[in-house]
Amino acid sequence: MENILEKLAYCVENGKINKTSPYPPNMKDQDGADELAKKALEAGIKPDEILENALIIAMAKVGDKFTRKEIYVPQMLMAAKAMNSAMAHLKPFFQSGETKRKGKFIIGTVSGDLHDIGKNLVAMMIEGGGWEVIDLGVDVGADKFLHALDENPDAIVGLSALLTTTMENMKKIVAAIKEKYSASKILVGGAPVTVEYCKKIGADFYSPDPQGAVNYLKQLAS
Ligand code: B1M
């Protein structure tokens, strides 16, 4: 583990949040994701490189281990906490877009779904792209999206879902939004979502990643 990004990925994968966190016991008093992300930036590694080459790789490994039943929800939660502690250092870089806002973007993870890491990344990158982001959080139903649209009728809407079960709620939310605000543009994403599903539920665009979301908004604004 000579490389700082490898160490960081190891910490996220194993839920080592920071130096003082007691978990996992074999890493007691060692740097965690918090310190290593800071050190990686100080060493001049670019934020998107840290994200792609350490954090996202680590979370993919966590997902694979969970699928193979090698780890369970508590370990997955610790990994998510470690990821968030690293993300806190990257956030200012992703948010430092132009100050003049290009428009508004409402985003939320759909009802029944508590996964927010991917949604937060999309929100951060879009904010960095110069948009005002209204983040409704997780477990967001149609009513809350509609309320946000009532206050910001010109906003573009983004829905994130990580579970095959909650994807169904995406369909209900899109239908409710299109019924009241037929001109609203809706962007969907999240691991189980596909371009076919996007078309099927009547959403306007699917992006597999934050950059695609940023590009879509850029295209709408031009
Ligand atoms: Co959950 N979980 N989880 N989990 N979890 C998955 C999603 C799972 C694939 C793991 C697995 O089985 N391999 C599986 C879903 C299976 C399925 O439905 N097909 C699963 C399960 C089953 C569950 C529970 C049901 C487990 C249980 O309780 N038995 C439970 C459900 C809770 C709920 O939501 N109601 C649960 C709980 C949790 C934790 C709370 C412990 C934790 C979430 C913590 C948090 O988010 N604050 C968690 C985690 C961490 C994961 C994995 C390991 C990692 C998710 C993640 O953050 N990835 C995940 C496995 C995996 O994805 N490999 C898993 C990193 C993140 C950067 O990627 O979110 O995909 P992602 O976002 C990407 C893209 O998808 C895209 O951009 C992002 C960056 O590239 N994107 C968008 C996302 N949203 C977008 C929106 C856009 C555009 C692009 O436009 C609007």
Image (cartoon, rainbow, N blue to C red):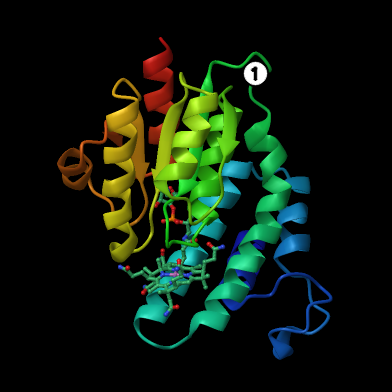
Question: Quarter containing ligand 1?
Answer: bottom left
For the point 68% across and 85% down, the residue is 24
Q: Is residue 170 above or below residue 67?
A: above
Q: Could you tell me if residue 7 is visible in this image? A: no
Instruction: Choose top left, top right, bottom left or bottom right for residue 128.
Output: top right
| Residue at point 37%, 17% (across, down) | 219
Residue 96 image-quadrant placement: top right
Question: Considering depth in this image, is 177 or 13 the residue closer to the camera?
Answer: 177
Mark 1 crowd level (few <14, some 14–19, many ≥20, 10 Å Cα) = few
The quarter of the rendered structure image containing the N terminus is bottom right
Residue 86 image-quadrant placement = bottom right
Q: Secondary structure at mark 1?
A: loop
Residue carrying label 1: 98
Ligand 1 within 8 angstroms of badge 1 C-beta: no
Residue 142 pos. (x, y %) = 40, 45
For the question of whether residue 166 can be seen, the reply is: yes
Q: Residue at x 68, y 45 (%)?
A: 90
Is 221 positioned to the left or the right of 47 in the image? left
- In this picture, residue 196 sits left or right of residue 181: left
- Residue 30 as seen in the image, left or right of residue 160: right
Q: In percent of the image, x 44 and y 61: which residue is there?
A: 113
Residue 41 image point, x, y percent: 73, 47
